[in-house]
Image: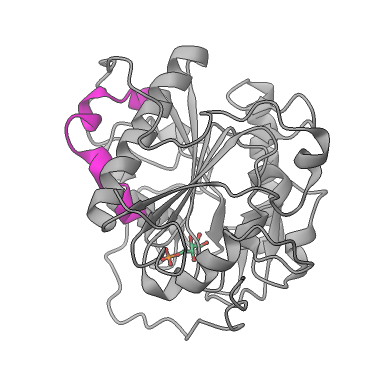
Amino acid sequence: MESAAPPRSFYAPLAHSHRLPFLTNLPSSPAKTHRPLQPLIARKIPSLSPIVASPTEPLRSHRTAAMAEASIRSEKPKHIVFKGEEELSKSLAKYTADLSEKFVRERGAFTVVLSGGSLIKSLRKLLEAPFVDSIEWARWHVFWVDERVVKKDHPDSNYKLAFDGFLSKVPIPPGHVYAINDALSPEGAANDYEACLRQLVKTEVLELSKDNGLPKFDLMLLGMGPDGHVASLFPRHPLVKENQRWVTFIEDSPKPPPQRITFTFPVINSSSYIAQVVCGSNKAAAVHNALGTEKTSDPLPAAMVTPRDGELTWFLDEAAASLLQDKASL
Ligand SMILES: O=C(O)[C@H](O)[C@@H](O)[C@H](O)[C@H](O)COP(=O)(O)O
């Protein structure tokens, strides 16, 4: 039995009680957004297994056309439940490092898409041994699945969140960190970001899916809001149906701030690997709803994450998984 969809609004206005110090030297151009703080470390890690506790095939490459077109899933995606966020973050680091090693070996680059929110904190184990020393950071290319249209030094900026908590601590080349142009309107920033992606296809940093001509990111790291939104694609918002644009914009986001840009579902679902990282009891109802297999005409955005030819894994803590039937934790 499915739980009812969570109520429409979970979002009280944000209190900006403690503004963080302004960052300096953060140009608007996507080509130069980030300063590496450490020398490059390029030692390869030995071959590692694809992921812990993998109950299904590592990569679902033989999905039927009908399955690929489905807007809601017809099978239960892989999910892993951890006792707590600490255990989850260790596994997420290994999962990410393994995929980094795989894609760097296979094609010399690793395209990683970040979201905002608590995900960034859950990436902290990548900053520790053995991962910090073994990952080929110079081969990483970092994108955002969604971004708030604010200046890069604003406390609401997903770029700032990721820079302060993660990117400033690893030697990813500045030109490989693709932040939005924060001088533009939401529409302008979405157009600019899409143009940036199209340019990266030309230079072969980004691959295209052979079957649908959309960019195929190696790894997308998604969070989920308590209302079941992913990226800036919110329940019952028309943008969840956008299927022409790669990147679009929203000016009435129910979660503040209202102006954002976001990848669309066709692009999200063209990824090779997607990790849906969710912690906390306030998300249990949405997790239960999204991981259900019953078809509904009004699926939560989180249930619309259905990679066409890739692998989706949910990383859950016990609290987020508390309403699931099969919630044995690692
Ligand atoms: O910019 C944003 O608002 C995020 O990208 C958003 O999609 C986030 O990932 C979820 O709201 C989960 O956030 P929490 O993990 O903080 O709940």
Magenta stretch encompasses residue 126: yes
Magenta stretch encompasses residue 146: no
Q: How is the image coloured?
A: one colour
- The vertical placement of 38 against 20, above or below, is above
- The vertical placement of 60 against 114, above or below, is above
Q: Seen in the image, is 207 located left or right of residue 109?
A: right
Q: Please name whichever residue, 166 or 281, is drawn nearer the observer in this view of the structure.
A: 281
**Residue 159 placement (x, y as % from top left):** 43, 53
Quarter of the image where one finds residue 121: bottom left
Asked whether the viewer can see residue 186, the reply is: yes
**Residue 122 placement (x, y as % from top left):** 31, 52
Q: Seen in the image, is 194 located left or right of residue 118?
A: right
**Residue 252 placement (x, y as % from top left):** 66, 76
Q: Which residues are magenta?
A: 120-138
Q: Quadrant of the N terminus?
A: bottom right
Q: Please name whichever residue, 322 or 237, is drawn nearer the observer in this view of the structure.
A: 322
